[in-house]
Image (cartoon, coloured by chain):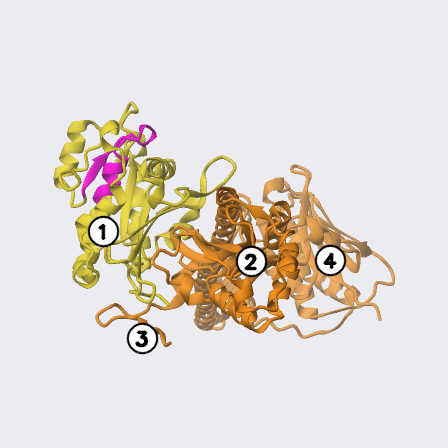
Chain colours: A orange, B yellow
Amino acid sequence: MPESALVAPGLPPPAPAAEGALQKQLALADLVDPESFREVFQSYAELYRVGIKVFDANGTKLVDVRVGGGEFCTYLFQHGPTQQRCTALVRQLKNQDYWATAEDPTRAAVVNCFSGLRYVVQPVVHEGDYMGRIIFGPFVPQEDPKPNPLLRQWEPKLDEARLVELMSPIRRAPDEVINKVIEQMQKVIAVILFTSYRAAMVSSMHIESVTQSYQELMEKNRRMEEQNERLKELDKMKSNFLATVSHELRTPLTSIIGYSEMLLEGMAGEIQDQQREYIQTIMEKGESLMKLITSILDLSRIESGNLKLALADVDLYAVTKAALTSIVPQAAKKKVELKTDMDPGLPRITGDEDKVRQVLINLLGNAVKFTPENGTITLRVKNYFGPRKHARSGGDKTGAVALFGIAEEDFVRLEVEDSGPGIPEELLEKVFERFYQVDNSSTRVHGGTGLGLSIVKSFVDAHKGDVWAESQPGKGCKFVVLFPVVRT
Amino acid sequence: MAARSPTSMVQFNLSQREITLKVVYYGPALSGKTTNLQVVHQLLDPQCRGRLMTLDTADDRTLFFDLMPIFFRTSQGFKVKLKLYTVPGQVMHNSTRRIVLAGSDGVVFVADSQLKEAKANQDAWAGMMENLKENGIDPEQVPIVIQFNKRDLPNVRTDEEMEKLRKSSKEPIFKAVAVEGKGVMETLYATVKATFRALNARYEFERKFGLTEKEFLHSIFKNVDLQSKGINLGEELA
């Protein structure tokens, strides 16, 4: 029958099936574990020596336990007239609609067999719902423990003595006893049903909660991903903006510096000392502004992902020499001694020569800046086999990361050590952040953009290397760079 | 087999002549929802109620819900089932609360009268409104009855305040001491009555199924020992 046929006009239409965790109607067969259920009735049947059958509300047979007495029924079934009656009785007991739609389906019914035996049909009811029925029997009624005398009228071929003999093993019981047994059995069934029902509710509720939580999480994830995408987009726009602005600023600045230089060289006529001093200041400031803009441009290129490495074999001796050459004048100005300590036979690394040199220049420049007069700066370039300081997969150095993330590798290790004021431990990671200077007042003393070390970090990261700072405050600090060496 | 409207649980199963309704006890943690249900279970005639199913943790906090079914047959041969649920009050179980609240035909909001619980009451109420809406239930349409429980504790709202609240509130308000059984039946009675009225207005129980409000209420509360408990449910049942 189609579902709609059950619904009277004017009633609300069926809802989508989604809401159903708590509303599912469960059949007996869905609720109980068939094997255990059967065992319970098996033990009852053995205890009382009476057969038990259980059908669920759909007419499915869940339990069928027989205990002796079968020969009596078999004997009757071998004869036509009694066979017919037997078939009719079985049909009645099995008639699903009859039992399910009885006036009061919760009440037990006594069914007398034509042979003189008796059955009791007890409905299984849970919270007012008809769940199925138990057929208890056959047993011999206490008040009339003989085969039905009419049996031999219906079938004269039946032998009286044989009937009595075959009936004798069948349990004889007064109705009160049977009622008590059934009452007791119902209690057990009630507990089984209640427990099973609760378990079913719990598990469906559990699944529903988990499903909903999962959907909520997925929704949140989706929203966060969207936001993340938007932030990335914004970040890119910011970097592009910086790049454009820096570029646009450089063009007029080049002219300012250029014309100042021409003035200084006297290309526009003789200039006085004071004018020279002023123009020199314009040029110096112009140049430091140019450096700042160039750094911003570099950084925004790095951030917008436009940093491209021109990879080649890098000769570290040549690169180091070039870097030192460009830093010597600054160092000499401050009377800072530059020492170098390079391993012989360093391997070539795969990298971008310009960027590697820039890394060295920035670190050396930084060291010169923070080293007081007559101080010392030491540059070491060494073969190194060991772990990184920063695990490749991020900052977390526990669990698997500790095991796999910081394996020992081949590196070229560059160290730039100064004899400056040093960096407090808690700030050792921060110095690589953009525009960060340990002490803001130092910007005024030492100058600089606060971008140099952040560019170092970006370049080293791009080379899949590692960089960090070590320091004992008061005794200077040491910047360490690892460039990976790929051995072939 | 069952047909139901998207916004309420009431289920009609005409082939089996069955009507199923759902009332949910909602409220902040430890306000006494389960206790309410335990009292109802104790006082109702065992003939018309099932076991109280409690799904709780070892420390007696409701984990999923409590459920107690009430059932009876009407004079017209309809089987009526009224399922009383409680939600878990702890904040973390919101998705469970929402699931349990789905398809409610009536709601009891069990508030904690203690002044220090005012915020918890407020949060639970706001959560309930949201969960009703998310279940497609219009909070304006579903009958809601408020119970202020734990009236016996110190530092609670005064009776005068309660009276003022009662006058200004759209929802009926009941005072209760659920652990002593006080106010529990009154709350349930008012909720069941309001629920029947709302559903009858919508689905014409009386005209279609011959089920009157009087019969409905009588079937549930007929064998409750009201007098010895000092419970006064009003005129209808006298």
**Residue under the point 19% across and 57% down:** B200
The residue under label 3 is which amino acid type? Answer: Ala
**Chain label for disc 3:** A
**Nearest the eye: B137 or B206:** B206
Mark 3 or mark 2, whichever is nearer to me: 2
Q: Is residue B236 magenta?
A: no
**Residue under the point 68% across and 45% down:** A470
Quadrant into which the C terminus of chain A falls: bottom right
Numbered badge on residue A482: 4
Mark 1 or mark 2, whichever is nearer to me: 2
The residue under label 1 is which amino acid type? Answer: Thr
Quadrant into which the N terminus of chain A falls: bottom left
Magenta segment: B172-190
| A286 lies left or right of B68 | right
Mark 4 or mark 2, which is nearer the start of the sequence?
Answer: 2
**Chain label for disc 2:** A
Q: Is residue B176 magenta?
A: yes
Q: Is residue A30 visible?
A: no
Q: Position of residue A417 (x, y in %)?
A: 71, 48
| A158 lies left or right of B55 | right
Answer few, some or many: residues within 10 Å of disc 1's Cα (few below 14, many 20 plus, some between 14 and 19).
many
